[in-house]
Each structure stands twice: as C-alpha cells, then as structure tokens.
Image: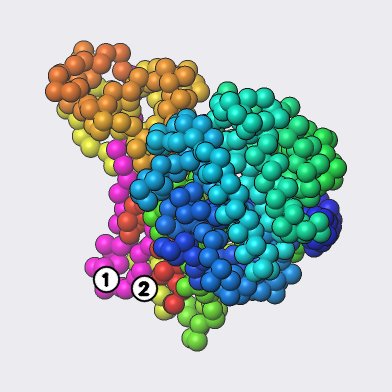
Amino acid sequence: MNYRKIFEPIKIGSMTLKNRIVMGPMGTSLANIDNSLSDRQLAYYKRRAQGGVSMIILEHAYPQIAGCKSKKSLGIWDHNLLPKWKNFIEELHEYGCKTSIEIGHLGRCTDFSRLLGETALAPSPIRCRMLKEPVRAASDSDIKKYQQDYLNSVRIAKEAGFDSIQLHFTNGYFLAEWISGRTNRRTDIYGGNFENRLRMALELIALVRAEVGRDYPLIARLASREEACGRGIEETRMIARAFEEAGIDALDINSGSPEEYDWEFPSYYKQQGFLLEDAEKIKRSVKIPVMSGGRIVEPRMAEQALLEGRIDMVEINRGLVADPDWLLKVSNGKIDEIHRCIGCTRCIHEKEKEGIICSVNPFVGREKEWLVQRAREKKNVLVIGGGPAGLQAAVIASKRGHKVTLMEKNKYLGGMLSVAAMAPPKWEIVNIVTALAAEANEIGVEIRTNCEATVETVSENKYDTVIVACGSKPIMFSLDGSEKIPCSTAVQVLAGDFWPGNNVLIIGGGMIGCECAEYLSVYDKKITIIEMLDGVAKDMSPNLRDLLLKKLKGAFVDIKCNSKVKGITDKGVVYEEDGEEKLLSGVDSIVFAVGLKPEETLKNSLKKRNISFIDIGDCNKVSRLQEALVSAVKATINL
C-alpha cells in the first residue's frame, strides 16, 4: 500500500503539521515527586519526536495539585519552572515536532486530594465508581478559582513555547463531569438542561481564547460517548459543533471513563479501530480538523481512514510507546519490523510503581539510561532459544556489532508466547515475535530453526558469549488415582498437543488456567476450575481480569475458590472446599494450570562442563513478556 496520505501536511488553525500522525496524551508517571517535569520524561518524549511524528500532545498536566492523580503527575502551576519547560520544547522542536499540552483536572476520579487533606471536587457529590472517594460539589468560588488557575497554566504553557494547548473535556474527569448528565445533577445555571451543562466548558474556552488570542491553536479532547447511562454520540456531535463555534481549532476524539474502562483504556478485547465510526460521525458535524485513535495499530488502517476522510489525523498513542519508530518504519517500508501494541494495558495499570512500562518495548522509561551503541570489541555470540527474550538479545547484540547465531530447536520461533497467543483474544501478542524476527534478519542475525543446541554444539564452536533463553515448562504434580482420568497441562491444551473430553477439570485459576478455560469454552465443554486462593486470575490487570471473568461467567464455567484437589477415585475427583471434603463426578479430563518453572536441562549440562553462559528470560526466572525482554537488554546492552 502507498502511504502518501499519512505524510501529507495539515493545518490546525495557524499551525502546520508535517504529517498526519500525532502522539496523543497518555500518562507516564515519570514526573518528579514535586509534580515537575523530569529528565526521564524529557528523554521519553524526545525519543518519540525522533521517530518523526508531527506533534506530541504532552500528557495530562494539572492546574491545581488537588486535581492530580499522584505525586508523579505533571503540574503546570509554577512559573519558576519555565526554563525547564522551554528546554523541553526546544528539544522536541529540533526534530520538527510540534508540541501541545493537555490541561485538565481529575475531579472526582482521584484519591490524591484526600492525601492532601481535601475532598475531591466535582459538579455534584457523586462518587467515582472505581475509587468511591467522598466528593463535594463545586461552589461558585471553586469554579472561579479553577478558571483562574487554569488560565495561569495556559499562560505558563504559552510562554514556555508550546505550539498549542489541549483542553481536556473527556474520560469522565472534572471538565467532562460538567457536560454529562450522569455526573452533573446541579440545579443552578451549570446544571439541568443541555445548555446549562455546557456552560462551564464554553466559559472556559472563551476565557482561554481571550488569553491566548485568536491565532493561537486550541484543541479540545472529547469522549465520543459514555456507554454506562451517560452521554450518547448524538449529544457529543452537538458539543463538538458548540466547541467549534466557541473558537476551538481541532477536536481530539477518544472515549470512555472509569465507568467504561475498556473504552478509555481499550485492551485486546476491543477491536482495532473501534472508534473510527464515532469519530467519522463527529467529523460530519464540524468543519475543523478531527483526530482520533482507538487502537489503530496497523499503518494500513491509518492510511485508509485518512484516505476515506473519516478523520483528518491519526493518533498513535500506545503504538508509539510500543515503538517510537512506528512512523519511520512506515516511511522506510519496514512495516513488518514495527513493534505493535498488543493491548495488554500494563502501561496503564503498572505505571504508578516506577513509571510507564511496555510489554513489547523494554526501553520505555529507560531511554536515557539504555543506549544501544557499537561495542569496542566484536564478539561471536550464540543465543539458544527463539522466544522473545532470545530474539531480543540477538537483535541488540547484532546492533552492537557482534556476530550473532540464534538456535531454536522447534520449527517455528516464539517459544511459550506462541502458546499464550492461543487464548481467544490474544492473537496480537505474536506480533512481537514476527517484528523481532524481521529485525534480526535485517541486521544479519543467523537464525537456525529445527536446530537443538547441545553441550557438544557449544563446546565444539568458539563462541565468546553464550546466552541461554530456553524458556520454561509447565508444572505438573502427581495425584492419587491420576491413572483413572487422562491428565495434561494447560500448555499442552493451548499448543494443540492434547484435546480434553467434554467434562474438564482445570486445576489452577491463575491467568493461564482461566485463559485455557476461555479457550475450551468456545467448544461447549463443561468446565470446572479449582483454585486454592480466594479468587481467580489475580495475576492479571484488573480490567482484563474483569473482562475475562465475564466471559467465563457467560460460558457457565464453574469456579471453586479456596479449594484443593485431594485425589481421584472411581466415583470422581475428591477436593476440599473451605475445609469440607467434596466430590466432583463426571470429570473425563484433568488439565493442570499450576504454573511454570525454568527449563534448566541445558543449563545444568553446561554447568557440568564448566561452560560459562548468561541465562535470560523464563529459564532464569519465570515472569511475563516485559520482564523477559528487560532481562535480554540487561544481558546485551554492555556486552
């Protein structure tokens, strides 16, 4: 496909963007603990600017500290930090990247105000469904104070040199709460009918427009709909038109709120491009440019949406977290090397720990720390194992100038990730394997599949460095009477090596067990999960867990927690639930999903022969994809 439209310039008011790809705002939790811009944030955004995007809209920045998410959120209220902001913008401008900053307030959707000794502020005292924190209704003086503080942030942003400002009217946060009847139950001039609910937004737009002047670009971010008894698409189209009439120069359409979490932070359960239909309808209501995303992962989808005039600019948010060179690879015809976002949502749910992470990009948040540079001395490197950790290690070692050979005993690359991809919604996860493999081939890694490495292989060749990435294997323990019923592991089921009967018992209710149950439920099997803990799928992100459990409930999967299998008799499977012994009859297949352990056979053989090696990924410590890739970088970045 020809990608000409993506690279076509476009204007937002007086500002010209060099292409149609924009990095939209997304929280990183990389700020300093005083809410100021950090060096890690600068390096993170600079890396994305290097990738060629036309504009970066900086993550949610707050005009009031009580409206922040945490100490790691960005505040934009201190004029003393102007030099740092100016330096930040100058760095991005070096790459021809325009800058914008999203200014808003979390309203009822934060518990940070409580930590400050305050009560969360909102139009009406209606608690957030997720946080359930106390909320107080904003008074007239609160409204005036917020507007003043907002204008203060606007002045700082403009003086710093931001090319535009984005006003945040979305995701169920403070300004969105005034527009929605779901969260605004006021009976004064700011509540009740549509015009009154729109008043706060229009007042703020007028104040900001008067502050920045007619020629300064203003963008408004707006959710297309609120599925859970909130605003619908037709009401949003009216809001969009009103914003245009009030002086907004472009619209940024996203979706969701804490009430519609999978719309705000769409996972792999949400189809790619799910927002395009809404964005197209909104675009028909206005004459100003409209940008949107909604899991636009593929360049072909981005180009087609632009060619068809459904949107004017494409937001690639998490896609640019996953691969800051997304656009460069499109430009250079290396689309198969793009590290595509897999929709796992770890970037959202785990960023408060040490800052944003990404399952398929181990460099996220470490852009300043980890630089892939040519090694002083070229080495002959052997990588054993063609899963993601092995492939990542091979790619980095090769980029550093080493001669790299990768051996994989199976016919195909991917390792345990190929098994994980068999869960119904997780097919996208294999993208990282194909991307790393394409990259490895491009830079000269010699990949040998159907080639099992042995001690003799290693000892007979003169390798300077041996990296073992043999992965993991499933745990399976013995049960009294297990010969009475066919037993296997969830890995064997998902890999297609074992097909259970119609009445299946899955021992273990972690992510693997639950995903195996989801996989088998498609085939109308009767499934029971027995889990020792007080809940299942506890090792998953909260939103993914909720969605998966809904699927299992819909498939009538019987989940027994606080339970343990004791053995098998002629009458059935004996298990203990809450201290009481019970019998599960009719089971014709048992599937173990009790975890994985490192594959250490080759490692032990190498140790016996005193052959040194570096072990990475699951064969060092069983973990998840992001941790496996991180271990590969650590092993090779200074090799």
As for residue 589 lying within the magenta part, the answer is yes
The image quarter in which residue 328 lies: bottom right
Residues rendered magenta in the picture: 588-617
Tell me which residue sits at (41%, 70%) in the image.
635
Tell me which residue sits at (70%, 53%) in the image.
208
In-front residue for pair 281/384: 281
Dot 1 falls on a residue whose secondary structure is: loop
The amino acid sitting under disc 2 is Ser
Is residue 47 placed above or below 116 in the rendered structure? below
Please indicate whether residue 320 sits to the left or right of residue 522 in the image. right
Tell me which residue sits at (85%, 42%) in the image.
287
Furthest residue toward front: 141
Dot 2 falls on a residue whose secondary structure is: helix
The image quarter in which residue 9 lies: bottom right
Q: Where, quadrant-wise, is the C terminus in this rendering? A: bottom left
> Do labels 1 and 2 touch, CB within 8 Å?
yes
Spot occupied by residue 364 in the image (x, y as percentages of width and height)? 51, 61
Q: Which mark is residue 609?
A: 1
Spot occupied by residue 24 in the image (x, y as percentages of width and height)? 65, 52
The amino acid sitting under disc 1 is Arg
Q: Which residue is mark 2?
A: 459
